[in-house]
Amino acid sequence: MTTMFDLTGKSAIVTGANTGIGQAIALALAAAGADIACVGRTPAVETVAQIAALGRRAINIAADLATIAPVGDIVDQTIEKLGGLHILVNNAGIIRRADAVDFTEADWDAVIDTNLKSVFFLCQAVGRHMIAQGHGKIINIASMLTFQGGIRVPSYTASKSGIGGLTKLLANEWAAKGVNVNAIAPGYIATNNTAALQADENRNRSILERIPAGRWGAASDLGGAAVFLASSASDYVQGHILAVDGGWLAR
């Protein structure tokens, strides 16, 4: 049974692999046997070192996904340096907080460009390669705000709602071509993106009161879901958004 989750011989792109959720997913995939292309604005030095300690190969690819300019190079470098491309994890993302009546166009565009536009065009470029080889796994990182509205994060909510729809659309188009497209929706995970919420005593209390598990999630809690969706264990899973949320959505 464990061979269903074995990623030996697979190569994966993980965006935003420097810290937090991206780092945890990269390490989980490597522990299952995959080699990893760590994509980000800054080198994922610690992540690469930890992957090497697991006996897997890892490379850094410098790319700012605020634009789609690096997309082709990300794919080309991964295939050239790791010998193939079998898994894509679209994790890189940003957030801007302000009341909707005060939200600026610049903050809207910055979040949508990084969280949605670049995700689509990286899926497109990787999808072309995977369709040609007849198989591949794409994992997008959604959010609780794929299902809910949230407050004071209009562009983030729009982008993550878009990720949910995009995941389903790509699954509809590519499932019969051997490419699985799914998403993970993290609950409230203790990362840099949620530092402001954790520091707000009232918000922190209200969040914890709603989580049946009674705690914020750790980035490592996403690893098992990522390995499942990247492996042959999920070959008949298509267009699914897997919530890893401590029970948040069940309330």
Image (cartoon, rainbow, N blue to C red):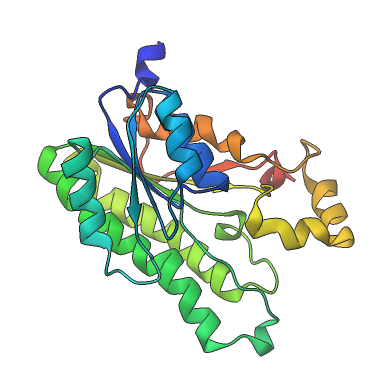
Quarter residue 219 falls in: top right
Closer-to-camera residue (51/103): 51
For this orientation, the residue located farthest to the left is 132
Residue 212 placement (x, y as % from top left): 78, 38
- The correct choice, above or below, for 48 with respect to 190 in the image is above
* Residue in front for this viewpoint, 41 or 180: 41
Q: Is residue 221 left or right of residue 236?
A: right
Q: Quadrant of the N terminus?
A: top left
Left or right of 142 in this view: 196: right
Q: Residue at x 69, y 74 (%)?
A: 152
Q: Is residue 91 above or below residue 135?
A: below
Q: Position of residue 228 (x, y in %)?
A: 43, 29
Q: Of all residues shown, which one is farthest toward the top? A: 1
Using the rendered view, name the quadrant where residue 125 is placed: bottom left
Circle count: 0
Q: Looking at the picture, how far across and down is residue 59, in whole percent?
A: 33, 42
Can see residue 159?
A: yes
Residue name at image x 35 percent, y 65 percent: 118
* Residue 127 visible somewhere in the drawing: no
Q: Quadrant of residue 113?
A: bottom left
Question: Residue 68 versus residue 121: which sits nearer the camera?
Answer: 68
**Going 68% across and 79% down the picture, which residue do you hit?**
98
Residue appearing at x 56%, y 68% in the figure: 156
Q: Picture coordinates of residue 235 (x, y %)?
A: 31, 30
| Rendered view: 8 above or below 154 | above
